[in-house]
Image (cartoon, grey):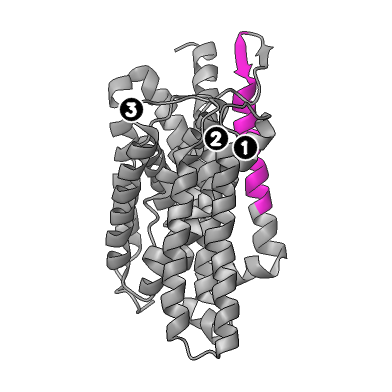
């Protein structure tokens, strides 16, 4: 391997690693706050990419209809919970009205907008905005429907539910988008040459977007009241409840941030590689390897681990392309062995 090939592989590894860093941060965020290993995160990557591809093709994405279906299901769940609550008649009416607006009326408007732009090609910024409006709200809706009532269950129960949600969303993705993959237009078609090395503008967009989002998350958790509430919930869920922090609202917010990150990763990688309805699962698994390196608790270690995964994948594709996935996932074995030796097993609830 000469220097030019090494530089190209490093460029690809850093760009892929930037996406894995974001996915790892989303997984750590959700697990530290809700104890859910968010396996369906990969579906948000695929849904984001394929929704953007549908809009660029001038067709109405099926994910818009899925948003309305999830919204109606969430509204029905809210009706059951509100009618069982001891609140007064006026408060119940107000709560039901707000729930109807959030989970039925607004998604119906989004579906109408998606249908109205069918056959037209919108500007890229509007396509991006509509993609986020369609996909991101599915995160907190999934939390309400599948995980909120199980918030105090064991990690194993939450993992089983997460696997079930992943399988359902995988099947829904196949129905909505079909088995054929799609690729979107790049955000930048510029090419920069530095000697023998050529750097694509899209790779720079991916890296810069990842850095900006990481910086925004740092400022959010360090400077805002809701961000500090999320940090408190992650440190000690029971203590956060005792001081008046709504852990249910924290869980919804964590899922919304995770779905936002997943959707962003989808639209960033769609111009680089063809995305299928099940492509996000493998990407999320690689982010999960990085999260495991960070112990599903440390954001800096998870970021460094994900960057290592991206570089290892790139170099492995040169030396043994058929085994690159095996090599990447084998990395988790020594990490788990080292952690099992250094940190004795503690029963859940004893920490």
Q: Of the residues under marks 2 and 3, which one precedes in the sequence?
A: 2
Q: Of the residues under marks 3 and 1, which one precedes in the sequence?
A: 1
Residue 258 visible at all: yes
Q: Main secondary structure of the magenta part?
A: helix
- Seen at 72% across and 64% down, the residue is 223
Task: Please state if 151 lies on the left or on the right of 99 as rendered.
Answer: left
Per the image, label 1 sits on a secondary structure element best described as helix
Mark 3 or 1, which is nearer the eye?
A: 1
| Quadrant location of the C terminus in the rendered image | bottom left
Q: Is residue 177 above or below residue 164?
A: above
- Residue 128: assigned label: 1
Q: Residues within 10 Å of mark 2 (few under 14, many from 20)?
A: many
Give the CA distance from mark 2 to mark 1: 8 Å
Q: Nearer the viewer, residue 224 or 104?
A: 104
Q: Residues within 10 Å of mark 3 (few under 14, many from 20)?
A: some
- Disc 3 designates what residue? 324
Mark 2 or 3, which is nearer the eye?
A: 2
How far across and down, in percent of the image, does residue 239 sit? 52, 82
């Amino acid at each position: 391997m000469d220097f030019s090939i090494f530089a190209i592989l490093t460029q690809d590894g850093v760009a892929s690693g930037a996406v894995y860093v974001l996915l790892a941060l989303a997984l750590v965020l959700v697990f530290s706050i809700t104890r859910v290993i968010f396996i369906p995160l990969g579906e948000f990557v695929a849904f984001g990419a394929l929704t953007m591809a549908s809009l660029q093709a001038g067709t109405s994405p099926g994910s818009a209809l899925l948003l309305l279906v999830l919204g109606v299901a969430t509204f029905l769940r809210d009706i059951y919970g509100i009618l069982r609550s001891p609140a007064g008649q006026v408060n119940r009416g107000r709560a039901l009205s707000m729930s109807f607006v959030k989970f039925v009326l607004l998604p119906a408007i989004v579906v109408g907008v998606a249908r109205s732009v069918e056959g037209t090609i919108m500007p890229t910024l509007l396509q991006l905005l509509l993609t986020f409006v369609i996909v991101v709200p599915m995160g907190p809706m999934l939390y309400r429907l599948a995980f909120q009532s199980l918030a105090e269950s064991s990690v194993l129960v939450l993992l089983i539910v997460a696997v079930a949600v992943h399988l359902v969303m995988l099947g829904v993705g196949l129905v909505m988008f079909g088995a054929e993959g799609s690729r979107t237009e790049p955000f930048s078609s510029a090419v920069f040459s530095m000697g023998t090395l050529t750097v694509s503008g899209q790779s720079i967009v991916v890296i810069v977007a990842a850095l900006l989002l990481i910086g925004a998350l740092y400022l959010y958790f360090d400077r805002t009241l809701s961000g500090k509430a999320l940090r408190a919930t992650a440190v000690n869920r029971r203590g956060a409840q005792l001081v008046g922090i709504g852990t249910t609202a924290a869980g919804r917010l964590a899922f919304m941030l995770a779905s936002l990150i997943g959707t962003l990763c989808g639209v960033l990688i769609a111009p680089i590689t063809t995305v299928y309805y099940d492509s996000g699962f493998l990407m999320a698994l690689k982010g999960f390897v990085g999260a495991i390196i960070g112990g599903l608790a440390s954001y800096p270690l998870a970021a460094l681990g994900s960057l290592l995964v991206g570089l290892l994948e790139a170099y492995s594709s040169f030396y043994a392309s058929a085994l690159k996935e095996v090599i990447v996932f084998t990395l988790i074995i020594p990490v788990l062995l080292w952690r099992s030796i250094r940190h004795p097993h503690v029963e859940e609830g004893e920490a």
